[in-house]
Amino acid sequence: MFNSLHEECGIFGIYTKERSSVAVSAYFALYALQHRGQESCGIVVNDRGVFNYKKELGLVNEVFDKETLLKLGSGKMAVGHVRYAASEHATPQNSQPMVVRHIKGPMTIAHNGSLVNSLKLREEYELNGGIFHSTSDSEVISYAITEQRLISGSIEQAVEKAMYRLKGAYSLILMSPKKLIAVRDPHGFRPLCLGELPNNEGYVVASESCALDSISAKFLRDIDPGEIVIINSEGVRSVRTHCESKSNICVFEYVYFARPDSVIEGASVQQSRVNAGRFLAKEHPVNADIVIGVPDSGLDAAMGFSLESGIPYGTGFVKNRYVGRTFIQPAQGMREDSVKIKLNPVSEAIKGKRVVMIDDSIVRGTTCGRIVKLLRETGALEVHVRISSPPFKNPCYFGTDIDSRENLIACQMSIEGIKDKIGADSLGYLSVEGVSKMAENARCGFCVGCFTGEYPVDVPDEKPKDKFILKLSQ
Amino acid sequence: MFNSLHEECGIFGIYTKERSSVAVSAYFALYALQHRGQESCGIVVNDRGVFNYKKELGLVNEVFDKETLLKLGSGKMAVGHVRYAASEHATPQNSQPMVVRHIKGPMTIAHNGSLVNSLKLREEYELNGGIFHSTSDSEVISYAITEQRLISGSIEQAVEKAMYRLKGAYSLILMSPKKLIAVRDPHGFRPLCLGELPNNEGYVVASESCALDSISAKFLRDIDPGEIVIINSEGVRSVRTHCESKSNICVFEYVYFARPDSVIEGASVQQSRVNAGRFLAKEHPVNADIVIGVPDSGLDAAMGFSLESGIPYGTGFVKNRYVGRTFIQPAQGMREDSVKIKLNPVSEAIKGKRVVMIDDSIVRGTTCGRIVKLLRETGALEVHVRISSPPFKNPCYFGTDIDSRENLIACQMSIEGIKDKIGADSLGYLSVEGVSKMAENARCGFCVGCFTGEYPVDVPDEKPKDKFILKLSQ
Amino acid sequence: MFNSLHEECGIFGIYTKERSSVAVSAYFALYALQHRGQESCGIVVNDRGVFNYKKELGLVNEVFDKETLLKLGSGKMAVGHVRYAASEHATPQNSQPMVVRHIKGPMTIAHNGSLVNSLKLREEYELNGGIFHSTSDSEVISYAITEQRLISGSIEQAVEKAMYRLKGAYSLILMSPKKLIAVRDPHGFRPLCLGELPNNEGYVVASESCALDSISAKFLRDIDPGEIVIINSEGVRSVRTHCESKSNICVFEYVYFARPDSVIEGASVQQSRVNAGRFLAKEHPVNADIVIGVPDSGLDAAMGFSLESGIPYGTGFVKNRYVGRTFIQPAQGMREDSVKIKLNPVSEAIKGKRVVMIDDSIVRGTTCGRIVKLLRETGALEVHVRISSPPFKNPCYFGTDIDSRENLIACQMSIEGIKDKIGADSLGYLSVEGVSKMAENARCGFCVGCFTGEYPVDVPDEKPKDKFILKLSQ
Amino acid sequence: MFNSLHEECGIFGIYTKERSSVAVSAYFALYALQHRGQESCGIVVNDRGVFNYKKELGLVNEVFDKETLLKLGSGKMAVGHVRYAASEHATPQNSQPMVVRHIKGPMTIAHNGSLVNSLKLREEYELNGGIFHSTSDSEVISYAITEQRLISGSIEQAVEKAMYRLKGAYSLILMSPKKLIAVRDPHGFRPLCLGELPNNEGYVVASESCALDSISAKFLRDIDPGEIVIINSEGVRSVRTHCESKSNICVFEYVYFARPDSVIEGASVQQSRVNAGRFLAKEHPVNADIVIGVPDSGLDAAMGFSLESGIPYGTGFVKNRYVGRTFIQPAQGMREDSVKIKLNPVSEAIKGKRVVMIDDSIVRGTTCGRIVKLLRETGALEVHVRISSPPFKNPCYFGTDIDSRENLIACQMSIEGIKDKIGADSLGYLSVEGVSKMAENARCGFCVGCFTGEYPVDVPDEKPKDKFILKLSQ
């Protein structure tokens, strides 16, 4: 099924004072956020209250071309979204941003995260005559806002009230005919930041600062947990009634999800990973000749491990940049190994050496085992595996696509057992304490529930399967 | 904009007693109904309550291939839809069948027709907190049924009650986890018929009998205006509380929309067209050497005109069967004429002759004028145009895509004026009386509102434009 | 394998005095010739000696779009080609027109027909060091012309000399940097005609006159068997040294291949088919209630049969215009019949009637048998099959895609046997004498070798299989 | 036009003792060679003398899918090719491998390199009646081999004789019905190596050793300059009559073209780049805080510079892995910069630092200038550019796509001038001496003609433009 962790989404919104090519800006920004979701993407342009959009399964460069961007046209606002989804949910219906029309006109919603009470809310809205077209939380959130909108003077008031009902992780970008609204849940599980366009032309919000960089927008600040930011012709203002004292950003944003060039809550993602490597070297030292990282996400931690340990850093693998989603898996019984097609060890760096291999996590253990085997075949004398995060033992309810313990090797066996299974000479994981201080300058607390099983908010005992009954094929 | 009339949709449903390849049956049936809509199509398969579907812009043979049909899988029920839509509404969101989930589980709806009170209903559901994803009537109908479903013991009861609220034209096929339901509005504006699969394997419903033929189903009967047919594991039964005395099928079904091999309300479409040609010959006789029809829809009436008048029938045009939707319009100032690419006069049949040319209607007059010109260039001595329906002067509110008088040549000038504009030697339209008896065996009355301006139900004074504010691009 | 006859190609050439949008003209003309080949197509534009081209597998409307035509650009000359090919030869390499470069610069060649001595010539050129990229005759012809071009003062002289070496059927359009050259083999197996653009703008050559009509070109005359027509800046002139007394156009051009609106060698194709129907009625009279034709090619002969016999003509079938090349064949054991999807009998015309069904030929008998069965299921009392050509018993060596007797039902059994196999009440074929006079005004003789086994030129004893060794997949 | 250097091709051949899935092996190997050419690719399978193939414009993962590989089928031999081409030559006709048929049957040819006498040879073959379908050297080589094949007892003898005629760079893989033949020109301009499949199953040849790794083949040795390797059912043997004393591999293979994990002529490409960085640090030392490389090709040299200089190595940029060939260039006047979309500086590593930025070459200077600007905007105090090869001042005649001095910044201005243009604080290029010893263990000499203007073989005074007259559009 899956061999790696996946973040659910990346979101982007733009507001310009004059009509401009907001679709093109969204296109570039989504390119920068593509690592947060590769299954589908979409852009909605708001041109004087008319919402034009295109959303489809595929990568940004597959879904959008010149003609499409031209058709989307100009406007003062746009919202964009990239989405990862488990295959059964990768449907056009679940593609985002979602565009709906309620009594006050059209509304667009882009969501990153996952609610813990969506099934309960869904049932409630159905009992009131509501109908659903998708299985996504965004539609539930739309109903929650619409419900309040009927009795509120403004969309931001409706959002504020709706937030009392939404439990879980949600970074949102909403668009009404006249306003762009960005919201972060009170725990701040998922990142969201605010930027300013050059020459005072307008504002942008995005999941990560790298999206701001790509369109030369200036990073202003992270949106606070619980904050509602309203951008319209009068400028930017905030509603902060949900801003609580404690915040719990998902630590995996630093470990794996975010792009190294992003800065989140004041902490550089790259530097956080270098730190994790340093801590790892302290917690699990080893005598070796070279430290290598598994591309791309293990490279920075490997650099940190090298700096701390004094063992030279080397480029251990060449990653094939051309292996795309249509890569054909070798048939059963074939000697070729898909890991080998993607990663080739550099003999010069490996042969005859005692190797420390750094990766960010082990999910099933299969891929890791294959890589260790490749290193041995290339002539490594010893292979010491170091993982820059703690063992992943618990489901995530806040937007990471792992919801069962069956697939997690760390739930099935001891660290010693894992070491044997992947064929390493030694194996060391970063501690929970270590991972909690990797983003040393971050102005926030962390959610480390996937490591500890202790979550910042109450989670369902077990996720009901009812949600999957409406299986939507493309 | 448009040069011809378009029917909005064709619908199909199948219920088999055992699981079978219902997707393939729907695929073949939609092929037979393709003439009713070429913009988008879709199939929903119900496999033990799980609804799998695929719907997309494109022709049946573009949207479905072997792999897609395989993915849709088997089941006991399926619903299919082909759709025509004015370009601004040709969106994935408006594609049908619509699949929604309400409190009682998933529901599929396929609709042919047009409501006159959809905006009013829409506003009402919005005031109750409802949100809309499309601009189609089907979503309004979904809300109407859901509203009643909450307080009804069965879906058919909900449909029966909802029908008191729906005004206008609707032939519907609904699918719940366990039932297939076919509904025709009390006026029976659009056709819908019931058939039986061979070997007692199950039942089908379809817009036209030609769809039944294509899958070797036996035609049982037309569904009556106002009738609700419920098909489930116990067989077929009807709810007839909405069956009123009077019916008003759209006469254009016989004139143009339906396929000649279909039989609707007991009348053969082909024979009805031959009849129209006969009446036309009586109403507007002329001395001539040959009678030709404009392919494909004018051919049967031309045959009738020939039989009545004694003037020999001839094949006047060869229609290019390869000109598809991607045909490139000749650029401005180019000599090539798109009419000429599609239709080439047969010189042998035309040259030196006095020609009677039969077509089914004149909308803008442009195409007709070009054809007359082609005939003259080919050497016709005289060109007498006969139209097998009355002048089209009024908008249709029941599912035909013409809603303004500006584009109708018959609203702009007299018959004499039209004759001059198209360059004919004479011009004759079939009378309202004539068209009303073309389907001589039909067991129903007709709606001839587009000719007379008198409609069987009250129509809005003017269609509000609000409906178009939510412009949905693909 | 195949259930119908296929012509190999349609060709088109244009020469304009000033640079113009010759690619667009070729595009429209190929649309009109599409019936002569649906596997691949191509256009080559000559812009001041630079040859731009696009050729690919697919229909004209699949291969060419606005952007492609724009890229092809303007010029004074263009050559176009549509091609049918048995599947193993449907390769990009065999796509036409062929563009090669020899010592005198680039040369384009478009070919309709088939040589009987191509393997012999091929071997000879290989022995001289030649290399081949395709299995098509066009490459052999290119070598034959190039061989002479080295020792000739002009390309037309080279063509004239090369013609002494080419045996068989070839209508050719050649393009050199400065000349457009049209050639028809001395027997004139395949048609080719010359036209003039309006306003003295230039000249065109095409397989059929319907291509001229589509671009408003005036038909001037057929190119004579053996004639070489040279078009350049000085106008049009001919070399007639190969014009012999006898000509033998393939009679199947009139029976099936050509479009009814074309006029070939002075005879209207449509009228020729009507004549064939008349002769058939005389040769094989029958008492019946209605005469119907199998669309599209049987319709004109059915009209002729009706006129001669006095039995009323009717529209017996509706042909589904949307069944394209991607139509999915029903799986084995499925009840749906692909013939039924394509052709639906019109009950009104058939039920309770004694039916005469006209088709142009029977190849394997399978399709014909299915159609007879459909008619009986629809309620025909009797089905009398009449075929507007003689039994097809011999291979064609001149460009029709049938080269083995195994697949021809008329080689396997008597007419009585065929009648039984297809389930008809009676069966009658048009005689060789009848088919030979169907094109009553044609200024030429006919090749009827596929009926009689007597060919105008010597044919190989058996086609060597060596030609197929180089199997080219796409 | 171009902003970077491009290698023309990567080639691959496989011979297995038993029929096997050679197409799949070729597919994986081409993935590993994709960096050598991204315009088109192709695979030819030889199944008992029948050559099946597919070649097309596009990347390996765009051209080949499961169905295609299945269609290509099994066999004992296959040849594959990836190709870069300047846009005007990126045509289906020029796609490789080339498959031709000469008097001895089919032959496949895959070529990497460029002949200096191809126009002369081409003219000669044209004078002998030859015709050309492409503008590629491979067709000239085919003629040269065919010419000799007519008078030679075997294909290897024909190749040996033909080599006396071919001047320039050519690594070739040829396939006849029974043999796989690999050839390297006497100077060995382009790499080519031999490998053995596991379990004694057969042999492979490939441009680079990384292709061998990807299919678990064991590297045996480089093919020697001038060597002809023949692989057939009897095993592997060589003809060495063209093996001369001197060899001159293109040094840019080490600098830029080859993949870092490849080993060529005994030298690790990665280590060679590290060496180049070391030499560069010695030749152009500088005081700075951090050394960064421009991804991906500048990273290894940056590591070497860091090791030699003691200045810490850092990750200066994040490269967007999702920017594909369909990336839409920002419109004129837009603020977004395509360099910025692809490369984002990591603020943490750059801000407030004196930066040494390593790249492998400067062609036009535009891209380099933009990157320097990005670094300054990110807060770099100083930017010192170091290039791991000498200034590129002369055209390459041996397979690198630069043939005019107009586009080379180093031909237009002094190093000081370039420094100013790109906005660097200092600029240093590696010396010719330095680059010549970067591959310190290589068992061969180097061609450094692009730096010095002195070439190992005579080159044409100026490339005639005649070759471009036959402009081939797709």
Image (cartoon, coloured by chain):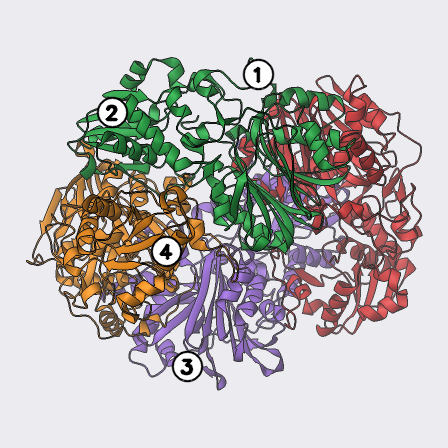
Chain colours: A red, B green, C orange, D purple
Relative horizontal placement of residue D436, taking residue D455 as reference (left or right): right
User: Which chain is indicated by disc 1?
Assistant: B
Looking at the image, residue C305 lies above or below residue C88: above
Circle 2 packing at 10 Å, graded few (<14), some (14-19), many (20+), is many
Residue type pointed to by label 1: Asp
Residue type pointed to by label 2: His
Residue type pointed to by label 3: Thr
User: Which chain is indicated by disc 4?
Assistant: C
- Residue D241 marker: 3
> Is disc 1 placed on a helix, strand or loop?
loop
Q: CA distance from mark 3 to mark 1?
A: 97 Å
User: Which residue is identified by label 2?
Assistant: B384
**CB within 8 Å, label 3 to label 1:** no
Find residue B60 and report its horizontal and vertical position in percent.
51, 45
Pointers 3 and 1 within a single chain: no
Pointers 2 and 4 within a single chain: no
User: Which chain is indicated by disc 2?
Assistant: B
Find residue B175 and report its horizontal and vertical position in percent.
66, 41
Relative horizontal placement of residue B101, taking residue D262 as reference (left or right): right
User: Which residue is identified by label 4?
Assistant: C372
> Is disc 2 placed on a helix, strand or loop?
strand
Q: Residue at x 80, y 32 (%)?
A: A125
Pointers 4 and 1 within a single chain: no
